[in-house]
Image (spheres, rainbow, N blue to C red):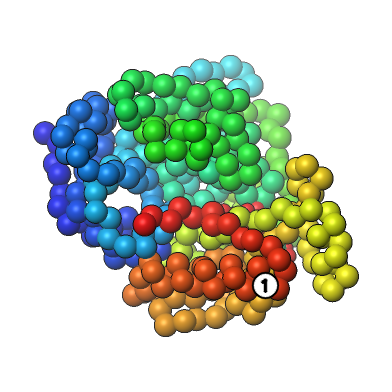
Amino acid sequence: MIEIEHNKSLKHLNTFGINAKASLFVSISSVNDLKEILQSDLYKQNKSLILGGGSNMLFKNDFDGLILKVDLNGIKIVEESDEYITIEVASGESWHSTVLYCVRNNWGGVENLSLIPGTSGAAPIQNIGAYGVEIKDVIKKVDGIELKSGRSISFSNDECAFGYRESIFKHEWKEKIFISSVTLTLTKKSHRLNTTYGAIQDTLKQLNIVTPTIQSVSEAVIKIRESKLPDPKVIGNAGSFFKNPSITLDHYQSLQKSYLTIPSYPSVNQEVKIPAGWLIEQCGWKGKKINEVGVHAHQALVLVNYGNGNGKEIFDLAMKIQASVKEKFNITLTAEVNIIE
Ligand code: EPU
């Protein structure tokens, strides 16, 4: 019997710690539960929202509809050779626990993605990435249930159409699928460690590590993230609020004349990617606090809720930041976080 909760507080179910309420709430712990709900009048008569770890969501208001909370669990080995292992991770498994499980087993490929909050099933939607690695580098396939028909559907890596914080699940398949599992292929030996990112090299040096391993890279990433990013259990946040924008080479060169030290990375289509954190810091926002919300003091890309802020306050702050970056640099920041109206 599936239990429906009414007027449920989402405060502990979103990492911003926003005390929004959902009029209807159900935990989905099996594909059968999901299929049953999809056929119900409750589902057909209400708007609905799939909620994973709530680590990339901003509830602007209470949610007048049905929340389907992803609670599918389990990790199983589906294929193994001397060199590779393929595992199927249920979508409700915490991503960081999955990474730690792989690191403990000495399976390589996800160590740079340590300590990213959220569930494994949400990870492919925005193609989570950090320190030179994206989840697309290890994904074999993504499985789910089409909401409309209740049928099972599978997407190969190519079919996921991954890009920077992008996938088909944010476009053609947005709000049309309940992801049930992600299947990852990892290395068992000849690991391809990625330690090119400056902060990783510096941290490995600090830890006196000359020959890095999966374990030490994971440890270094955890150390970097802990030093820059606020722990959502302590200060509410959803990681980077905005995406790093890409601008044309001409635009970049004209900005360089006024801002000699503007940081940049190559992007696609001969464009240049600029760290949004730098743009926001240049506009004077870093460390700013407005009532209960603010901009993190160590990383300007992260908006924070000091405790009792509401979604509207965070949203208004984001809009002000966006407007000042537009005015100063003529660059439009787009939110990385999903804003739930
Ligand atoms: N910077 C500043 N001021 C700031 C923040 C950043 O000047 O307040 C500049 C610095 O020049 C720094 C550069 O931005 O060298 C890059 O900063 P950082 O290494 O912290 O990375 P990021 O571009 O701000 C991205 C991801 C993070 C990911 C890191 C590490 C996005 C939107 N964010 O941040 O992902 O952990 O790289 O790879 O791409 C997330 O998506 O939630 C997230 C935390």
User: Considering the image in quadrants, where does the N terminus appear?
Assistant: top left
Observer able to see residue 311: yes
**Which residue is at 60% across, 77% downward?**
285
Farthest residue to the left: give it. Answer: 1
Observer able to see residue 214: no
Q: Position of residue 196 (x, y in %)?
A: 76, 48
Q: Position of residue 112 (x, y in %)?
A: 62, 46
Q: Position of residue 197 (x, y in %)?
A: 74, 52
In the displayed structure, does residue 137 sit left or right of residue 3?
right
Q: Is residue 297 above or below residue 36?
A: below
Looking at this view, is 188 or 29 the one in front?
29
User: Considering the image in quadrants, where does the C terminus appear?
Assistant: bottom left
Density class for disc 1 (Cα within 10 Å; few <14, some 14-19, many ≥20) is: few
In the displayed structure, does residue 208 sit left or right of residue 256?
left
Residue 50, image quadrant: top left
Q: Position of residue 289 (x, y in %)?
A: 50, 81
Ligand 1 image position (quadrant): bottom right
Q: Is residue 287 above or below residue 119?
A: below
Look at label 1 and name its amino acid: Glu
